[in-house]
Amino acid sequence: MNIAKIKKQVSDFYVEHKKSIGYTGVVIIVALIICVYFSTSPTDYPRGTIVRITKDMSVTGAANLLKEKGIIRSTLVYKIYVVLLHDGKGVQEGSYLFADPQSALRIAYRTAYGQKDMEKIKLTFIEGHSSMELASLLAKNIPGFDAKSFSVQAQKYEGYLFPETYFVDIDTQPSEIISMMREQFEEAVKPLVQEFATSTRSMKDIITMASIIEKEAGNKTDRRIISGILWKRIDEGMHLQVDVPFYYVMDIAEGGPTLKDLATESPYNTYINKGLPPGPITNPGLDSIRAALNPTPSEYYFYLADSNGVTHYAKTHDGHLANRVKYLQ
């Protein structure tokens, strides 16, 4: 059915019924006919189309996009439905699958209340992944994902992308995943707000320390003891001498950094620079953040992990060397 046919049918209807039901009645019925027509799906409806409504898109923007994609006939009818159905609250962001033809009313309802009919992708980010590692994981799980763009955008939020299980749309954009992870970080650390406020350390230093602890220890007890050791080294003007920052900035082999690596000039080299690296090197979990905030005091200055992941501590450098001989050779 096209516009010319509608006009002719309306004209014929008016001529035939104007005397029996009056002008007003004809107008009402004609308006209903037109509304019903523009509420139906287009004849060339593109089955299986995915349409993405962005976070800041208005109802008009969504209507224009849906019209452009061939999902609706009339932007006006769609907008009226959205306003009536959702009390003027607009449309919900996300990717919507339009598998089969649907009325404008149904489409308005779906976009107003976020019924996307899309199967989500489950992504689990574990504690201690850097933004580069997150980018690689995303690229493996989301077809066509722009991992390079994610890496560039995410790097400035290193340490603040919270490790968690997320469910995302198949065409989720890098900026949206970053926003999701940043929001989850803010939510996760809410119980620690007072501790951050009363700490003598800055939040940046705490998160940076937590990012190191995440890679240095595998359980709650060790995390807090190692936290105490590393903060003590900093407070006493010692070098941290931890290897994990090298993995963040250099392509280090399985055997760990070499003597040449340890002599490399880099702000992340904690063997030649005192204090913390310039920023976080991983995205730590809540337990490591708590450990950085609440270190366990001890007499130890040194530690190492054996091949089974068991941590051994020493008060002196000689004791540390003895542990190396005993547990690593």
Image (cartoon, helix red, strand yellow):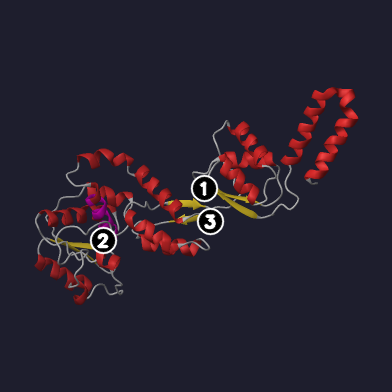
Q: Position of residue 58 (x, y in %)?
A: 54, 41
Residue 302, compared with residue 7, is above or below; it is below
In this rendering, the label closer to the viewer, 3 or 2: 3
Mark 3 vs 2: CB contact within 8 A? no
Give the overall secondary structure of the magenta segment.
Answer: helix
Image side of residue 162 versus residue 58, left or right: left
**Disc 3 packing (10 Å; few <14; some 14–19; many ≥20):** some
Q: Nearer the viewer, residue 81 or 200?
A: 81
Image quadrant for the C terminus? bottom left
Q: Please name the amino acid that badge 1 sits on.
A: Thr
Image side of residue 247 versus residue 162, left or right: left
Q: Please name the amino acid that badge 2 sits on.
A: Glu
Q: Quadrant of residue 225?
A: bottom left
- Per the image, the residue denoted by label 2 is 216
- Per the image, the residue denoted by label 3 is 171
Q: Which residues are magenta?
A: 205-215
| Count of number-bearing discs | 3
Marks 3 and 2 sit apart, C-alpha to C-alpha, by 35 Å
Mark 1 vs 3: CB contact within 8 A? no
Q: Position of residue 53 (x, y in %)?
A: 55, 47
- The reply to whether the magenta stretch includes residue 41 is no
Q: Residue at x 19, y 47 (%)?
A: 201
Marks 1 and 3 sit apart, C-alpha to C-alpha, by 11 Å
Q: Position of residue 118 (x, y in %)?
A: 59, 51
Q: Position of residue 321 (x, y in %)?
A: 13, 70
**Disc 2 packing (10 Å; few <14; some 14–19; many ≥20):** many
- Per the image, the residue denoted by label 1 is 54
Sequence-first tag of 1 and 3: 1
Q: Please name the amino acid that badge 3 sits on.
A: Asp
